Amino acid sequence: MSRISTNHEFVERFTTGTVGLPGERTFFIQIRGSAGLSSVVVEKSQVQALAERLRTLVRELRASGNASLDELSLQHKRDQEPLEFPIDEDFRVGIIAMSWEESDQRIIIQLQAMGDEQIVDLLDDEEALLIEDAPELVTASIRIHQARTFIDRAEFVVNAGRQVCPFCGLPINNDGHLCPRANGYRR
């Protein structure tokens, strides 16, 4: 079976969101673009890492002058819309890669499905042809203002979860929390 690869060259929306209650949430990255709608499942830590790396990349682009002033000056909008329905999981993300395409003035984000334990790198399409069950891949070309919108939304979604214990840093459930730093005293 050959690899299923989806390429969103013109992205209308690149966002993150959750389904479920805090403590039991499933995180999604959703892309609406030229290839339709893609919804992939990610870990909370992957959303945080992607947002932080995008923030660093935008800062580097501004400092280096590799991005055009037109791109850098576009205002980003606050994305408060829910994820688009139906939310059909395409796959669970294992590897996320990101690069800057200076000729197109776009950030390229590649989301590869979890694959065989032997596959630990992001595969290009030629390498994927050599592997029988190569993991699925979704590629999105986003603009700088879309990256900023994603960063804002990611911070909001990640912080909307359970409160964190000020003593041990573990999440506090609705039914309480047995804090190891307080010798199990329930707060």
Image (tube, rainbow, N blue to C red):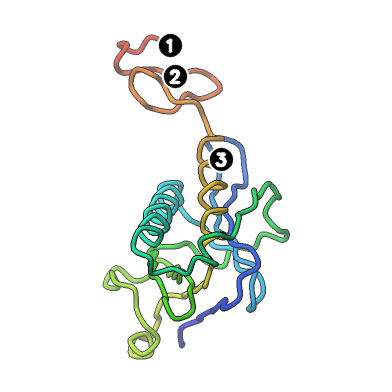
Q: Position of residue 14 (x, y in %)?
A: 58, 61
SS at badge 3 = helix
Viewer-closest of 187 and 14? 14
Q: CA distance from mark 1 to mark 2?
A: 6 Å
Asked if marks 2 and 3 touch (Cβ < 8 Å), the reply is no
Q: Earlier in the sequence, mark 1 or mark 3?
A: 3
Task: Kindly indicate the quadrant of the structure image that contains residue 133.
Answer: bottom left
Task: Kindly indicate the quadrant of the structure image that contains residue 88.
Answer: bottom right
User: In this picture, is 139 found above or below 185?
Assistant: below
Q: Nearer the viewer, mark 2 or mark 3?
A: 3
Asked if marks 1 and 2 touch (Cβ < 8 Å), the reply is yes
Residue 173's label in the rendered image is none
Quarter in which the C terminus is drawn:
top left
What residue is shown with label 2? 177
What residue is shown with label 3? 156
Name the residue located 36 percent from the left edge and 26 percent from the top edge. 169
Q: Position of residue 146 (x, y in %)?
A: 57, 60
Q: CA distance from mark 2 to mark 3?
A: 24 Å
Q: Position of residue 41 (x, y in %)?
A: 52, 58
- Is residue 174 rendered to the left or right of residue 109? right
Name the residue located 49 percent from the left edge and 72 percent from the top edge. 106
Residue type for callout 3: Phe
SS at badge 1 = loop
Residue type for callout 1: Arg
Q: Position of residue 13 (x, y in %)?
A: 63, 63
- Is residue 8 rendered to the left or right of residue 60? right
Viewer-closest of 84 and 148? 148
- Is residue 88 rendered to the left or right of residue 158? right
What residue is shown with label 1? 186
Residue type for callout 2: His
User: In this picture, is 88 found above or below 141?
Assistant: above
Viewer-closest of 184 and 145? 145
